[in-house]
Amino acid sequence: SQELEQSPQSLIVQEGKNLTINCTSSKTLYGLYWYKQKYGEGLIFLMMLQKGGEEKSHEKITAKLDEKKQQSSLHITASQPSHAGIYLCGADARGGADGLTFGKGTHLIIQP
Amino acid sequence: GAVVSQHPSWVICKSGTSVKIECRSLDFQATTMFWYRQFPKQSLMLMATSNEGSKATYEQGVEKDKFLINHASLTLSTLTVTSAHPEDSSFYICSAVLMMNTEAFFGQGTRLTVV
């Protein structure tokens, strides 16, 4: 079965600093999704990556998928309080047919 | 992006009763809907895959007789937790997919508390 390791589990970053969250799969991915979640609430879609070496950016958040399609990183530049929350990576093994397997999440805290 | 509406957003029920959660895709027809469960401080775990007009496919360890899924139309899937017990208390969230290889859109989630 698909396993997804997400690191770090939690991260405290001073406002304005950059940070990176990693997501590693045990198998080659069909697609990799990044979501943000406030605990116990719905998911906010950030980005979807499908091609090896793909990189996407939205505002100050950049996500990359490695060439082998087994590892992804989410990078936040000049972090702000609004970036605080739980970041989840989700792995798509079969083009969406089997749902997503999620990592355990990274709890990001932004210190003023 | 597309909108998936999930209702109710929270519910408290007595042990032994049944609870129905609805998941609607508001502006697109979803070929497939998924149901996930999230226990406190844990990740989302897929419970079942629901295709319109056919029986749901359940993940290992999920009791199909306890978690009844009905997907009667391309815009509505329901999850019924039957004979709920306190250990069923969790955050349930659905997602809908328009077609293969496209983004999955998530509902707002339902927080179920069984007392």
Image (cartoon, rainbow, N blue to C red):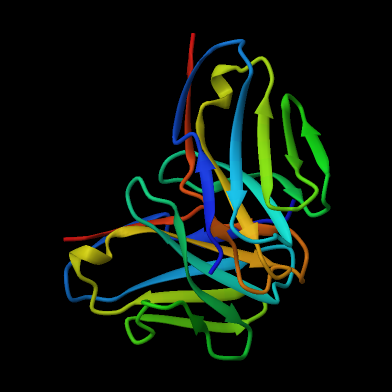
Residue B42, percent across and down?
A: 38, 50
Report the residue at 35% width, 81% height from top: B63
In the figure, is residue A10 to the left or right of B15? right
Report the residue at 44% width, 52% height from top: B43
In the figure, is residue A6 to the left or right of B111? right
- The answer to whether residue B29 of the structure is visible from this angle is yes
Residue in the foreground of this view, choosing between B76 and A51: A51
- The answer to whether residue B75 of the structure is visible from this angle is no
In the figure, is residue B55 to the left or right of B86? right
Residue A77, percent across and down?
A: 69, 19
A83 above or below A78? below
Residue A63, percent across and down?
A: 73, 37
Numbered marks: total: 0
Residue in the foreground of this view, choosing between B28 and A65: A65
Residue in the foreground of this view, choosing between A89 and A43: A89
B29 above or below A12? below
Residue B26, percent across and down?
A: 67, 63
